[in-house]
Image (tube, grey):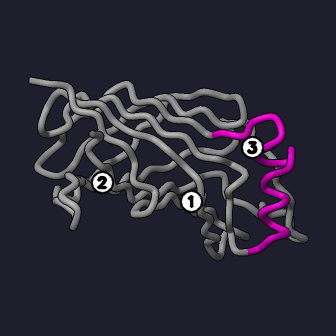
Amino acid sequence: MATTKWVVDPTHSEVQFKVKHLVISTVTGTFRNFEGGATTEHDDFTDAEIHFSLDVDSVDTNQEMRDTHLKSADFFDTASHPKIAFRSTSFEKVDDDEYTLKGDLTMKGVTKPVTLKAEYGGTAKDAYGNQKLGFEVTGKVNRKEFGLTYNALTETGGLALGEDIKLIANIQLAKAA
């Protein structure tokens, strides 16, 4: 079978994260600028090579002061580490629409293996005849494992921020010409 290349359609994709604040509520953030793609030799995407990178400076939590703090050395340190990158090591079908996506995530200069869940949303042609397909990718990473160790304490001694970060990416891929 021929190799097929796919590119992320940023107009129809989004990347979000969620973190607990004061253990009582969740703050959601978005990365506005990202790119990526996939290369596959199978129609069902089994064993696809998947790569993705986020422009950390594009982080948006709807609060300018918080975004500035996230870009600082306390968190992402965008001056020294402008990108978060992912490269797959395996993409395995679990059942009809479910896949396990394993790969190496690099954040703030630290690379660690991660396992994510990918749910296939389907394939369609857009109004211009371009072949598209969609996945929702979800998972969880511990921010401290990637050197994001900043944490303020509440007045009762509790942590202000959760350690686990939920990842949610709704990705539409376009078949490359």
Identify residue type, mark 1.
Phe
Lower sequence index among marks 1 and 2: 1
Binning the other alpha carbons within 10 Å of mark 1 as few (below 14), some (14 to 19) or many (20 upward) gives: many
- Residue 154: image quadrant is bottom right
Identify residue type, mark 2.
Phe
50 vs 7: above or below: above
Q: Nearer the viewer, mark 2 or mark 3?
A: 2
Q: Nearer the viewer, residue 12 or 130?
A: 130
Image point 47% across, 61% down: which residue? 14
Q: CA distance from mark 2 to mark 3?
A: 28 Å
Residue 80 x/y as whole percent: 81, 34
Binning the other alpha carbons within 10 Å of mark 2 as few (below 14), some (14 to 19) or many (20 upward) gives: many
Which of the labelled discs sits on residue 17, or is there none? 1
Q: Which residue is mark 2?
A: 135
Q: Nearer the viewer, residue 104 or 176?
A: 176
Q: CA distance from mark 3 to mark 1?
A: 14 Å
For the record, the magenta segment spans 63-83
Q: CA distance from mark 1 to mark 2?
A: 16 Å
130 vs 35: above or below: below
Image point 60% across, 27% down: which residue? 111
